[in-house]
Image: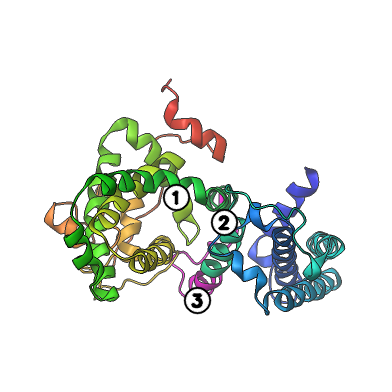
């Protein structure tokens, strides 16, 4: 435990101790490469239990093992550079130890240890790919155009938000079942095949736009209800309790809210018969867009602000200022806030801070239980 605390302290070290040439960048890169290698090797050993069926095919491609071999080599290389350059050797030796362990248990030559198909699985591969994709996409952008320049990658409460990211990815099967169950029941009992066929045969781009407009309308009202009903607000307060905004903060959502929000927004699209390709494309857009509007990005984007949700628009939704209370509920199109009187986007101004007035506990477990506990 002491080693883990020391490792976290190294990652959260002040900017003055992480300058180029200090060994911090190479140590952090080595740790990331080593962890990715260990996860990949573990997935190769237990693919049926730790991977999603849609992504399982990646492990059998011709390029997967050579890429894994390259990542392991990079982990070794960066670890040695960090050990040489940095006064504290913790980052380098930790990364090196993880990389060596990944190699010892099989490395790129690892194969299915169990060899048994199972209907239940965890989305460990989904977590890694999602985290790497959004991280590599938004971290450089946030460094180039930050809203708050002093905010670092390993900012306040980054561990909590990373754990939320992990939980929602690992339990992707459970979430998919719970969120799609209502729409499947409604679809089974409705007779509107001709309408469903007509909607599903539209050009896919048009379907995606329609899904975004439709789900954003539903989500606007579900979102607003979560703010107005005290019991539901306690679930949503967990999301608003983040005191720092960046691409990772969007993942902080209570499990119950995820199920309710996703099921309510999935019902229209599934019931009306939009094609699976359009729905999957929409889900990809939602993942990226959520990271974007929560990002630590200083762009005003005033020209598109009235028509598309921007980071500044959504940051006002998270603001602690008096004028930020119960505004900007839309996720894609601010027109709904304009229509229903909740639009707030003052010219070039940003909220002074983020969070909620009540005291939401820290840590995933405490925040999970928070809505179910009576107020003292």
User: Is 156 left, or right, of 28 in this rendering?
Assistant: left
Q: Is residue 242 visible?
A: no
Under circle 3, the secondary element is helix
Give the side of residue 210 with respect to residue 290, left or right: left
Alpha carbons under labels 1 and 3: distance apart: 36 Å
Q: Tag 1, which secondary structure?
A: helix
Q: Is residue 122 visible from the viewing direction of this image? A: yes
The residue to which callout 3 is attached is 144
Badge 2, how many Cα within 10 Å: few under 14, some, many 20+? some
- Residue position marked by numbered label 2 in the rendering: 155
127 and 172: which is toward the camera: 172
In percent of width and height, residue 166 lies at 57, 52
- Circles 3 and 2 in contact, beta carbons < 8 Å: no
Residue ID for mark 1: 176
**What residue span does the magenta drawing correspond to?**
136-157
Q: Are marks 1 and 3 in contact (CB under 8 Å)?
A: no
Residue nearer the viewer, 199 or 165: 199
Q: Earlier in the sequence, mark 3 or mark 2?
A: 3
Q: Is residue 273 above or below residue 84?
A: above
> In this picture, is 367 found above or below 204?
above
Q: Nearer the viewer, mark 1 or mark 2?
A: 1
**Residue 140 magenta-drawn?**
yes
Q: Choose mark 1 or mark 3, whichever is in front.
A: 1
As drawn, 369 above or below 99: above
In the rendered image, the quadrant that contains the N terminus is top right
Dividing the image into 4 quarters, which one contains the C terminus? top left
Q: Badge 1, how many Cα within 10 Å: few under 14, some, many 20+?
A: few
Q: Is residue 9 left or right of residue 120?
A: right
């Amino acid at each position: 435990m002491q080693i883990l605390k020391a490792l976290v302290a190294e990652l959260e070290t002040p900017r003055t101790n992480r300058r180029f040439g200090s060994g911090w960048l190479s140590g952090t890169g080595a740790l990331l490469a080593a962890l990715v290698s260990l996860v990949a090797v573990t997935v190769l050993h237990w693919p049926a239990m730790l991977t999603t069926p849609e992504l399982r095919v990646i492990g059998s491609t011709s390029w997967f093992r050579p890429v894994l071999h390259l990542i392991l080599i990079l982990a070794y290389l960066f670890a040695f550079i960090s050990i040489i350059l940095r006064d504290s050797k913790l980052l380098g030796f930790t990364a090196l130890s993880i990389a060596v362990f990944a190699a010892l248990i099989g490395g790129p030559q690892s194969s299915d240890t169990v060899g048994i198909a199972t209907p239940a699985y965890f989305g460990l591969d989904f977590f890694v790919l999602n985290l790497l994709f959004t991280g590599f996409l938004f971290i450089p952008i946030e460094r180039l155009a930050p809203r708050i320049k002093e905010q670092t990658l390993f900012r306040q409460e980054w561990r909590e938000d990373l754990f939320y990211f992990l939980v929602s990815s690992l339990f992707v099967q459970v979430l998919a079942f719970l969120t799609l169950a209502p729409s499947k029941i409604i679809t089974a009992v409705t007779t509107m095949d001709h309408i469903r066929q007509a909607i599903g045969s539209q050009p896919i781009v048009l379907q995606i736009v329609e899904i975004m407009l439709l789900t954003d309308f539903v989500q606007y009202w579900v979102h607003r209800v979560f703010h107005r009903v005290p019991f539901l607000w306690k679930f949503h307060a967990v999301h608003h309790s983040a005191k720092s905004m960046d691409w990772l903060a969007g993942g902080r959502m209570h499990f119950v809210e995820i199920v309710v929000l996703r099921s309510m927004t999935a019902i229209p699209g599934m019931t009306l018969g939009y094609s699976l390709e359009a729905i999957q494309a929409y889900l990809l857009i939602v993942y990226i867009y959520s990271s974007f509007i929560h990002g630590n990005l200083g762009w005003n984007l005033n020209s598109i602000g009235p028509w598309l949700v921007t980071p500044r628009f959504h940051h006002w939704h998270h603001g602690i200022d008096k004028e930020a209370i119960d505004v900007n509920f839309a996720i894609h199109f601010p027109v709904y806030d304009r229509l229903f009187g909740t639009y707030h986007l003052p010219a070039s101004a940003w909220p002074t801070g983020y969070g909620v007035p009540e005291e939401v506990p820290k840590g995933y477990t405490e925040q999970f239980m928070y809505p179910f506990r009576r107020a003292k």
